[in-house]
Image (spheres, grey):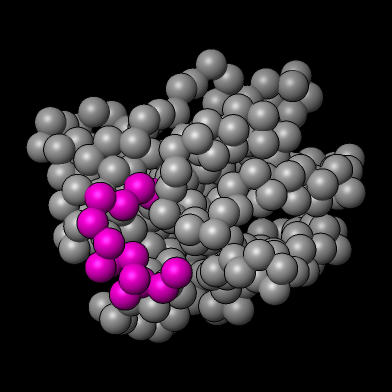
Amino acid sequence: MDFTTLSARQGKVMVSVGDSFTEGMCDDVLPDGSFRGWADRVAERLAADDPELRYANLAVRGKLIGQIERDQVPLAATLDADLVTLAGGLNDVLRPRCDIDLVEAKLRSCVQQLATETTTIVMFRPTDPRRRMRGSQRLMPNVERLMKLVDDFARSHGVVVVDLFSARVFDDPRLWAEDRLHLSPEGHRRVAEAVLQALGAEPAFDWRRELPAARPTPWVRARRQDLRWARIYLLPWVGRRLTGKSTGDGRPAKRPEATPVIQAQATQ
């Protein structure tokens, strides 16, 4: 189902499942304290054509693909969605002892549960981490397997694939938040546009276009930023990995029910 068909149908349902990427971490903060995020931005665009659109976002930061499969996908499958966005597995890949075979099996299960004749599923080829994250080369064999699996879903289930991997604009640190792991508001804006264009929407702007050149950061300031990042973000992240904790522990989804987008915005 393309964007024209989605736009023509009234009373559509959009459901997003995943982790912090889909929750919208580090985008603009809404009046209720939640993050906006690319998925909210896509829902808002669809609601401009369909005021009756209902939208649920079940994503929770820190979740592994097994948790997404267990806690989010079964509920998403009951919502009779016209559009489902599914992003998960990268939190697993970041872990040193990632069982990539298990990750692939869980992703297949998610797609099988969500796929219907009337549901459009959107998945992603993730951004390339090598030019902005030191030591990320070790992740690439598993990242490449995830991308191959997503491409296979496009052939076998008609999944719409959003290719962020080939977009060099995501090498720009301005598209990333201070924690260097989550998108900035500009990053979320571009992912939302990438999703809409993958669905066939009329382009609002070139989401792959590079930002104007920025002045180089002086070496001393850059090293201070590195030290601050390690103290505030990296060390706590390592600590959570060692203790088995997650920032999403006990956190509910921000939109656990499919509710009208216009109505939700008006009440915030």
- Residue 14 to residue 244: above or below: below
Residue at the outermost front position? 117
Q: Is residue 31 left or right of residue 183?
A: left
Question: Horizontal and vertical percent for residue 162?
Answer: 54, 70
Specify whether residue 205 is painted magenta. no
Q: Quadrant of the C terminus?
A: top left
Q: Is residue 116 left or right of residue 264?
A: right
Q: Is residue 174 left or right of residue 264?
A: right
Closer-to-camera residue (158/187): 158
The residue that appears at 45% across and 69% down in the rendered structure is 1
The residue that appears at 70% across and 73% down in the rendered structure is 155
Question: Horizontal and vertical percent for residue 262?
Answer: 15, 44
Q: Which quadrant would residue 138 be assigned to in this image?
A: bottom right
- Residue 92 to residue 160: above or below: above
Q: Is residue 100 visible?
A: yes
Closer-to-camera residue (221/212): 212
Specify whether residue 13 is painted magenta. yes
Q: Is residue 89 visible?
A: no
Question: Horizontal and vertical percent for residue 95?
Answer: 79, 41
Region in magenta: 1-14
Tag count? 0
Closer-to-camera residue (129/149): 149
Q: Which quadrant would residue 15 be assigned to in this image?
A: top left
Residue at the outermost left position? 266
The residue that appears at 38% across and 39% down in the rendered structure is 56
Residue at the outermost top position? 250
Question: Horizontal and vertical percent for residue 136?
Answer: 75, 59
- Residue 196 to residue 33: above or below: below
